[in-house]
Image (tube, helix red, strand yellow):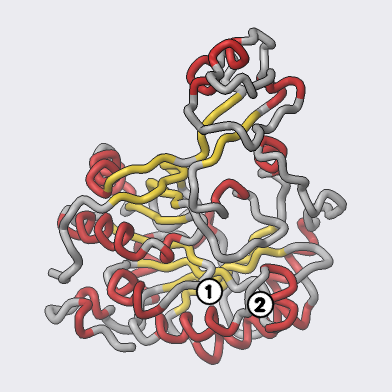
Amino acid sequence: MNNLSRTDITGTVLEIQRWSVSDGPGSRTVIFLKGCPLHCPWCANPESQDRRVQMAIFSTRCVRCGACVRECPENVAIPAAEGAFGTDNCTGCGNCIRSCHGGARSWMGEEMTAGEVVDLVKKDMVFYRKSSGGVTFSGGEPLTHPQFLGEIINRCMDLGIHTAVETCGYFDWKAAEKTIAMLDFIMFDLKHMDEATHKRLTGVSNRLILENILKISSFGIPMVIRIPVIPGVNDDEHNIRATAVFVRDHLPQAIGIEALAYHRLGVNKYQALGIEYPLGHIEPPSDSRMAALRKLITDTGVPSITADNDYDAQLVRSRLKSTPKHLTKDGPDNAQT
């Protein structure tokens, strides 16, 4: 048993998605937490970047009933169909959201306790058992919420639930170390290997990210490395090869690299938040391009994997090189740094 507090810590949850099959082994419940230190222009979840609860306005859903105007105590709301996106005088009372008949307005995020999250997770335990699945924490960057995340994982461990995290790697190691040590599986993004390019694209250096992934490697927790493939941004062969060589030479417990093709599924969220989408000029990569990059990865000596074929609990167990610290009797307090 670890020594994290068992008090009912609160955190800002963006969404809880059930029955996912692409976020780790088996059937997963994915818990998205708000707040990310990176600002990737291709982000499919822009509402996850800000730690605060936000209001989203979907103008195409507006039925022009006028309820939002009538219910606004500050007299600043106008129908969503007119492209309104809040004002400085909005107090965030939520009257316009509760009164909206078309679902054109909604909150992005909700304050929840760790206990409330786990109560929802427990409803899907039968599916975890049948599929060797579990819970995956995503975001945003979940490891910037180490106490909240650690409390949920701690309770999942007590219930025998497999836990995984999707991380960009930019977090305070000292704050997150004990939480990481409890995890069963990690999906780690490497967006670009060149430090200057990484900073230009995401707003932060990749130095801390690479330091953290090497520290995680010492725990022996099975890991998948993910590369978001953005045409003309990070899909050049030099970057893909450099990533594969780094994984091959420094991450022996990684079961492979998953190349994720860029898509535009989050564009409507940018519109709902009143943000201009920065990559409207970029087309998703072709199947042949993705196949060529995956071959480049395998030619470097690293397995190229996909969630459809390789996110299998038995495979993850079989690729484990050493016993993770969180499975030993000493527990996470003795995890290596």
Residue at x 30% of width, y 50% of height: 10
User: Which residue, given by chain and number where applicable, does mark 2 sit on?
Assistant: 297
User: Which quarter of the rendered picture does the C terminus lie within?
Assistant: bottom left
Please provide percent x and percent y for residue 129.
25, 48
Residue at x 41% of width, y 85% of height: 215
Residue 150 shows in the view: yes
Taking the view exactly as shown, the residue that stands out farthest to the top is 65
Taking the view exactly as shown, the residue that stands out farthest to the right is 281
Residue 27 shows in the view: no
Element class at badge 2:
helix
Is residue 315 toward the left or the right of residue 70 in the image? Answer: left
Residue 323 badge: none
Residue at x 32% of width, y 67% of height: 184
Residue at x 34% of width, y 72% of height: 180
Image vertical order of residue 12 relative to residue 191, above or below: above
**3D distance between C-alphas at marks 1 and 2:** 9 Å
Please provide percent x and percent y for residue 136.
39, 55
- Which of disc 2 and disc 1 is earlier in sequence? 1
User: Which quarter of the rendered picture does the N terminus lie within?
Assistant: bottom left
Element class at badge 1:
strand
Give the amino acid type for the residue marked by disc 1 in the picture: Gly
Is residue 153 toward the left or the right of residue 140 in the image? Answer: left
Please provide percent x and percent y for residue 100.
56, 16
Figure label count: 2
Question: In front: 173, or 220?
Answer: 173
Residue 256 badge: 1
Is residue 337 toward the left or the right of residue 286 in the image? Answer: left
Give the amino acid type for the residue marked by disc 2 in the picture: Ile
